Image (cartoon, rainbow, N blue to C red):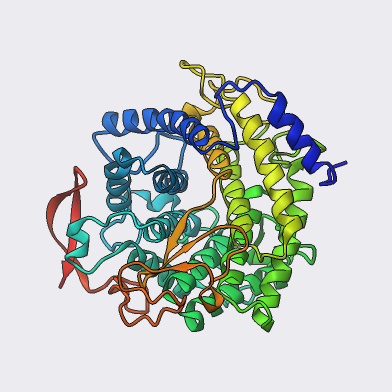
Amino acid sequence: MRGISGFGLTSLALSAGLANAIDLDVNNRDSVLNASKIVVDNILAVYNNYTESSGGIPGLLPQPYYLYNAGKMVNSLIKYWALSEDESIVPTLQSALVFQLGPDFNYMPPNQSKSLGNDDQAAWALAAMSAAEYDLPVPNDLLSNNITWASIADTVFKEQVARWDTESCGGGLRWQIFTFNNGYNYKNAISQASFTLLATRLHRFTGNSTFYGEWATRAVEWTRSIGLMNQNGQTFDGTDATTNCSEINRLQWTNNAGLFLTTGAYSANVTAPDSATGRYWSELNQLVTNSSLRIFVYEDRDIIYEVACEPSNNCNIDQTGFRAQFVRSLATYRDMAPSDDIVSRQNITAVLRASANAAAAACVYGENGTSCANSWYDPVDDTEDYYGQINQNLNALEVFLANLPSGEIKMENGSTYGTGVGGSLVGGANMTERGNGSGNGSATGSNMPKSSGDGTGAASTLVVSSMLTVAGVFVAVLVLA
């Protein structure tokens, strides 16, 4: 039976007893970053080799990985850069983020239209949001056109608002963007969860609760009302618009739970805890946290696993990478949780420590003996099956980094928030000043970077005018018409 009663003791035993293939001491920052560097090198070896062999197209991974997988990879590498200060990967991150923008600056590259979903687009927008929050340098060629990482994320969000479909099921986003793609009639949890997370992160970044905050709440409420999230906080995979969402695919994935947990963490973080909205998010966070730790933690070993496919060794290429988001989400909630939520923070910390140790022990495969297996609780050599182990190495990277504080997260007014334990933006707690920031946690939007969208989400005022080099690659430059 799975449970959380043995968290602390199991973690201590694992911390003391495992001889890791990748040497890891979760209590030592340098050790965590050194372990992270090993898996980053594994990831970049595959990515750079493919980029060079494909004629120099940044931001893509070899088949059968999709655009979504590449966006998640970039997002993870941004966090690694922010915590490690490894400046050597900045050009790689910039080139990927810029090259996959597409002609309308909305992460809809035309060559991906046959499989482009709302989750693909949102994955890249969330990476851009991470770039904004962690203050990744914006190439001058974007800045000269008043385009920033945050304005790109804003454009994507407003496009998805325009796709919110009230004609079937009373709302929700369809999985696929185009009617000719398989999956267009599927309204899945990942599309809703990615949308809500983008909304709440823009809410936090801009201080605009009226637009972004209300959309985050609306989307979560629709997800709950339709049955994709039940009264216990369990999240299910999706439903069919052609049946008016009357039937639910009840598979549960770590990725979906994690995205909703991060949404709740950010939303609670910018809401007065004693307000009705604050209580709403606090209660939701407790439900999702408790159900996730019960369902996705293996028995009494405190090790995270993908319950729907891992025990049967039947995870497909996407499913092998879901835990990366989940462990990142647990760390985000741990760092943003209310100061009185001691139990959740302790339970999450124990699981992240045990899972990191198990992941390090499972990184013994591949040519260099440090490529990571899919399973952490029962690792086997699956390196021939999973195409360079990108997802497996990303899982390991995120769980290693999850044992460090999440770092300072920037707001658009120039302020930063150091995400230590029990932080809150309400009333300016734990705020620091940077640039022109007021340090009070409120953003008026008066100095908000100009968005590439106009409220409809379409970057219709932009045209392609020339080609120039950004971060070492050629990109289509969009300038104001």
Residue drawn 79% across and 63% down?
232
Residue drawn 77% across and 48% down?
295
- Compared across the picture, whether 413 is left or right of 340 comes to left
- Compared across the picture, whether 119 is left or right of 336 comes to left
Q: Is residue 252 visible?
A: no
The mark total stands at 0
Percent x, y for residue 128? Answer: 38, 57
- Locate the C terminus and report the quarter of the image it occupies: bottom left
- Compared across the picture, whether 473 is left or right of 298 comes to left
Query: For residue 61, which quarter of the picture?
Result: top left
Residue drawn 64% across and 31% down?
357
Residue sitting nearer the eye, 308 or 263? 263
- Locate the N terminus and report the quarter of the image it occupies: top right
Percent x, y for residue 386? Answer: 53, 28
Query: For residue 152, which quarter of the picture?
Result: bottom left
Percent x, y for residue 370? Answer: 51, 22
The correct choice, above or below, for 403 with respect to 30 in the image is below
Query: For residue 19, which quarter of the picture?
Result: top right
The correct choice, above or below, for 348 with respect to 445 in the image is above
Residue sitting nearer the eye, 115 or 270? 270
Furthest residue toward right: 1
